[in-house]
Amino acid sequence: MILKRFSLLICLLAIFNCSSKDNNIDNSLSKNQESADLMYIDAMNKFNSKQSDEAIIIFEEIERLYPLSNEAIQSQIMSGFIDYGNLNYDDAIFKFSRIINKYPSLKNIDYVYYMRALCYYEQISHEDLDGKNNYLALENLQQLIKRFPDSKYAKDGRQKVVLVNSNIAAKHMSIAYFYQKKGKYTAALNRYKIVISNFSNTRFTPEALYRTTEVYMTIGLKEEASNTASVLGYNYPKSKWYELSYNLINKQNKSKSFLKKLNFLDDE
């Protein structure tokens, strides 16, 4: 985690080096540009010396005194980054969101979108707990990818989307299995279907198909069980869940014709 945050800081400093040269925001209204520069240098020196509390005070003062300067925008991003580094995610999200709303055309705004998404992503905990941050992280990562598909941050965003989807699918599976064990079969089926329909690229799809087959067999819907097992066998022929579904269907239905219908046996 320390190495990861150091890498993000390197990116942040690189962005500032570029933005100070290339940003098109008009600084002509600032009468004390030199003072803003000196204050920003002082704040960065304190930040690099691990005096984050002192640094953030100066960054906020730059925002107040020189709101139209490049340093003010950079200070806002640095302030958000310090909150992120201190795990003050709510404050960081507020600051990054404010930058996005106020400066939508800012150079390297993709970095700000990325940092906001990370604030949600890093709050994701075990799938059995509140899943709110799963969806907020997913929403923000997808915004990053959609708006900036060629951004260097989009690649990491896509990888994190896969992990978030797996976490959401795991939560649905946990709830579905709980319902199944309690005999609430309709509720269980609805959850399994969400995994199958919306999270088909996760590792939980084969199990969701098997559990659906299992529920259908339990409630006597053999044709639905047959159809679901066929889908499982066609898409995941080497999965352990395919083998379990085969054993389940074979145990309940001894007739060879029924097994042929499931495509478990080759036609003779």
Image (tube, rainbow, N blue to C red):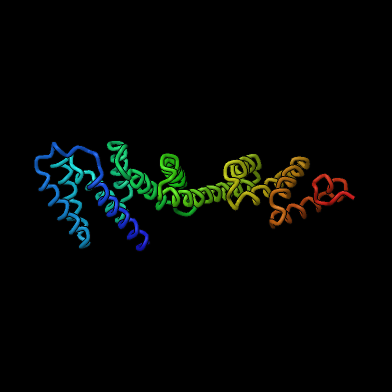
The answer to which of 9 and 93 lies nearer the viewer is: 9
Residue 226, x across and y down, in percent: 77, 44
Residue placed farthest to the right in the image? 268
The answer to which of 25 and 191 lies nearer the viewer is: 25
The answer to which of 159 and 93 lies nearer the viewer is: 159
Looking at the image, residue 98 lies above or below residue 58 = above
Q: Is residue 150 visible?
A: yes
Query: At 73% across and 50% down in the image, what residue appears?
Result: 233
Q: Is residue 15 left or right of residue 201?
A: left
Q: Report the label total.
A: 0
Query: At 20% across and 44% down in the image, what residue appears?
Result: 72
Query: At 18% across and 42% down in the image, what residue appears?
Result: 69
Which quadrant would the N terminus be assigned to in this image? bottom left
Residue 254, x across and y down, in percent: 86, 51
Q: Is residue 32 left or right of residue 133?
A: left
Q: Is residue 132 visible?
A: no
Residue placed farthest to the front in the image? 22
Query: At 49% across and 49% down in the image, what residue appears?
Result: 164
Residue 112, x across and y down, in percent: 33, 45
Residue 37, x across and y down, in percent: 14, 49
Q: Is residue 135 left or right of residue 74?
A: right
The answer to which of 171 and 104 lies nearer the viewer is: 104
